[in-house]
Amino acid sequence: MAAGAKANTIRSKQLCGYQDEAGYQDKAMNTFPPRVSAARRNAEALLDQSTRKKEGFKLEQKQEQEELAMKTARLRALRLAKEAADQEAAATVPARPAKSRLTRQK
């Protein structure tokens, strides 16, 4: 092996975090952040996007449930008020006597 080729091999091993016989590891390698692949970045972006969509959907669903509960409570209050008014009106109107039917004799 030529001297230049040997130096290149040693340098490439050092860049890859290679430890020599004494256990020395290239410290420069540890200071750089690890590379994140494009596929991982894309996957994380998709995950974030789907998480935001789910949260938005849950929030929208909760708002619709609250609106429905408010509408139901309003309609129930109106129905109860109408029933109470109808009962009050029925109590003030005198009841008609029932008409008796005359039966014919044969």
Image: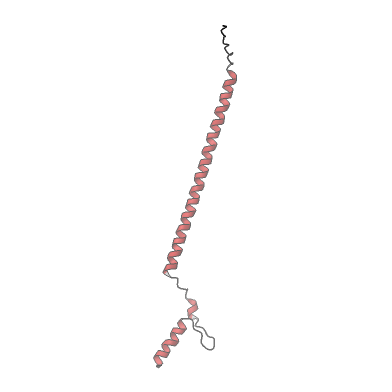
Q: Position of residue 13 (x, y in %)?
A: 46, 84
Q: Position of residue 40 (x, y in %)?
A: 45, 67
**Image quadrant in which you'd find residue 94:** top right
Q: Is residue 4 above or below residue 91?
A: below
Write the residue at 44% across / 62% down.
45
- Looking at the figure, which quarter contains the N terminus? bottom left
Q: Nearer the viewer, residue 21 or 97?
A: 97
- Looking at the figure, which quarter contains the C terminus? top right
Please name the colour scheme applied to the rendered image.
secondary structure
**Name of the residue lying farthest toward the front:** 106
**Name of the residue lying farthest toward the bottom:** 2
Write the residue at 55% across / 34% down.
76
Q: How many marks?
A: 0
Q: Nearer the viewer, residue 28 or 40?
A: 40
Q: Is residue 78 above or below residue 63?
A: above
Q: Is residue 71 above or below residue 6?
A: above
Write the residue at 50% across / 81% down.
27
**Image quadrant in which you'd find residue 105:** top right
Q: Position of residue 29 (x, y in %)?
A: 48, 79
Q: Position of residue 10 (x, y in %)?
A: 45, 87
Q: Is residue 34 left or right of residue 87?
A: left
Write the residue at 44% across / 66% down.
41
